[in-house]
Image: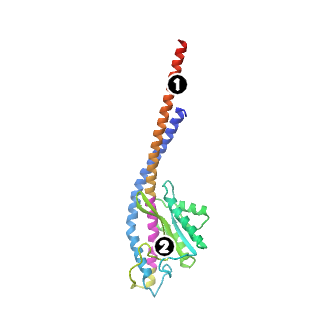
Amino acid sequence: MPGGKEIRGKIKSVQNTRKITKAMEMVAASKMRKAQERMRAARPYAEKIRTLAANLAAANVTEYRHPFIGKHHGLVDSPQRIGLVLVTTDKGLCGGLNTNVLRLVLSTMRKWQAEGARDIRATCIGNKGLGFMQRLGANVVSQVVHLGDTPHLDRLIGAVKVMLDAFSNGELDVVYLAYSRFINTMRQEPVLEQLLPLTGERLGTPQGSWDYLYEPEARVVIDDLLVRYVEALIYQAVAENMACEQSARMVAMKAATDNAGNVIRELQLVYNKARQAAITKEISEIVGGAAAVA
């Protein structure tokens, strides 16, 4: 059995760790509220522009057709050249949040390769996803890390534009977006959805055929709308991921704090037993010594 001094040192070490995890839990709880408010504020705009884009993809546009709309009007079957925008966190200590989305991405990439995909390019938003892709040996064409606690679109769109330009130039057949979607504080869902060409997968196929009147002209309106579409979805994905990050970190740090408390109680019991054994030994030695003298 370890000595009392060694056990006291372990207890002190765990107590210090518990202070750190408790502080991180409180900081994450504070940031979580702000991140959730930001995410919920951006959701209506993102969903509305997603609806407009899905309707536009199904519309009968004859005068101008943007490259983002493509020829398929929906999901692409067995693409050969694939772009992936991967959104993860910059820091760890947030449970299995990054692990879940990276596991989904890895299994999907293996499926693409099994189906004969010959060119897979990645844009990484977040340090964890970048490190994973580099260890995997993937073709990372652009990246953005150290985003802080607030997403800024001007920092995001530069890295994503590399992927969008490749799609517009015909170098890619399809572009996917992978991130963690916020369900509630205790649950975050990894998502991999098609970003380009436009699809109504999440919203369902629009009912009937759509036709629009454009002012001043179709090219100006559609170009601006589709740029807004991509920006809104990227921003929303990052905002969702940040809300997931703070929620997952708060839960993980609370669990770590509770576990530290359990470890301290167990070590306290061991220390008390060791101390009791030492006292009993000393009493036995004293009694034995007194009996020998007598």
Which residue is depicted at the point 56% across and 69% down? 111
Say if 249 sits above or below 59 in the image: above
Q: Which residues are magenta?
A: 223-244
Q: Residue furthest top?
A: 294
Query: Was residue 139 drawn as part of the magenta stretch in this picture?
Result: no
Is there a contact, CB below 8 Å, between mark 2 and mark 1?
no
Please indicate, yes or no, whether residue 15 appears anywhere in the rendered image.
no
Q: Nearer the viewer, residue 141 or 73?
A: 73
Number of numbered callouts drawn: 2
Q: Is residue 242 above or below residue 160?
A: above
Q: Tell me residue 53's x, y (percent).
A: 43, 77
Q: Residue sitting at 53 percent across and 18 percent down?
A: 288
Please give the residue where the numbered disc 1 appears in the rendered image.
281
| Mark number displayed over residue 29 | none
Q: Main secondary structure of the magenta part?
A: helix
Asked if residue 241 is among those painted magenta in the image, a careful observer would answer yes
In percent of width and height, residue 172 lies at 56, 76
Residue type marked 2: Leu
**Image point (48%, 84%), residue name:** 65
Which label's residue is closer to the chain start, 2 or 1? 2
* Residue under pointer 2: 195
Q: CA distance from mark 2 to mark 1?
A: 73 Å
- Name which residue type carries label 1: Lys
Secondary structure category for the residue under label 2: strand
Q: How is the image coloured?
A: rainbow
Q: Quadrant of residue 240?
A: bottom left
Q: Nearer the viewer, residue 246 or 184?
A: 184
Residue 251 x, y percent position in the rendering: 43, 53
The percent position of residue 292, horizontal first and vertical second, equals 55, 14
Callout 1: few (<14), some (14-19), or many (20+) C-alpha neighbours within 10 Å? Answer: few
The answer to whether residue 235 shows anywhere in this view is yes
